[in-house]
Image (spheres, grey):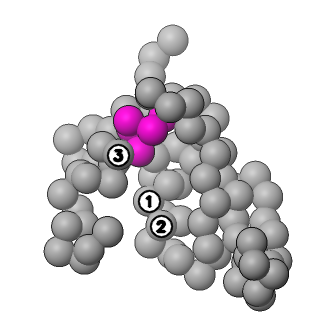
């Protein structure tokens, strides 16, 4: 995503669509990408594993994240857990 578009809710909307309509429950994030890591943590994902190498065998650790339960973005783009 372009820097000037960050914070406008586009990423949150795309993630909500992927979760709600495509069953996405897992994502992989480069460990060095603190912004992406924080984005997913704020939306209910938790780290479940870590790989020391990326998919091409390079030394760029990958964090494997999973969402525990569905969440909806709020107006400010942060997660709100669904009530059961």
The image shows residue 66 at horizontal and vertical percentages of 65, 45
Residue 64 forms part of the magenta stretch: no
Disc 1 from disc 2: Cα separation: 5 Å
The residue furthest top is 84
Q: Nearer the viewer, mark 1 or mark 3?
A: 3
Q: Which of pointers 2 and 3 lies earlier in the amino acid sequence?
A: 3
Q: Residues within 10 Å of mark 1 (few under 14, many from 20)?
A: some
Identify residue for label 3. Answer: 14
x and y percentages locating residue 29 in the rendered image: 60, 66
What secondary structure is marked by label 3? Answer: helix
| Label 2 vs label 3, nearer the camera | 3
User: Mark 2: which secondary structure?
Assistant: helix
Q: Nearer the viewer, residue 45 or 13?
A: 13
Residue 26, percent from left and from top = 64, 46
**Whether residue 52 is situated above or below residue 12 in the rendered picture:** below
Real-space CA distance between mark 1 and mark 3, rounded to the nearest whole angstrom? 12 Å
| Snapshot quadrant of residue 67 | top right
Q: Residue at x 52, y 43 (%)?
A: 44
Q: Would residue 67 be found to the left or right of residue 10 on screen? A: right
Q: Residues within 10 Å of mark 2 (few under 14, many from 20)?
A: some
- Give the labeled residue for mark 2: 36
Q: Residue at x 76, y 52 (%)?
A: 48
Chain part drawn in magenta: 15-19
Tag on residue 39?
A: 1
Residues marked 1 and 3 touching at CB (< 8 Å): no
Residue in view at x 45 percent, y 52 percent: 42
First in sequence, mark 1 or 3: give its number.
3
- Residue 31 appears in the rendering: yes
Position of 11 with respect to 31 (left or right) is left
Determine contact: label 1, label 2, CB under 8 Å.
yes
């Amino acid at each position: 995503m372009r820097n000037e578009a960050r914070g406008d809710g586009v990423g949150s909307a795309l993630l909500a669509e992927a979760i709600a309509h495509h069953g996405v429950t897992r994502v992989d994030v480069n460990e060095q990408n603190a912004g992406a890591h924080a984005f997913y943590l704020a939306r209910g994902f938790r780290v479940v594993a870590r790989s020391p190498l990326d998919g091409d065998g390079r030394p760029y650790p990958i964090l494997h994240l999973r969402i525990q339960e569905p969440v909806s973005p709020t107006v400010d783009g942060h997660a709100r857990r669904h009530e059961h």
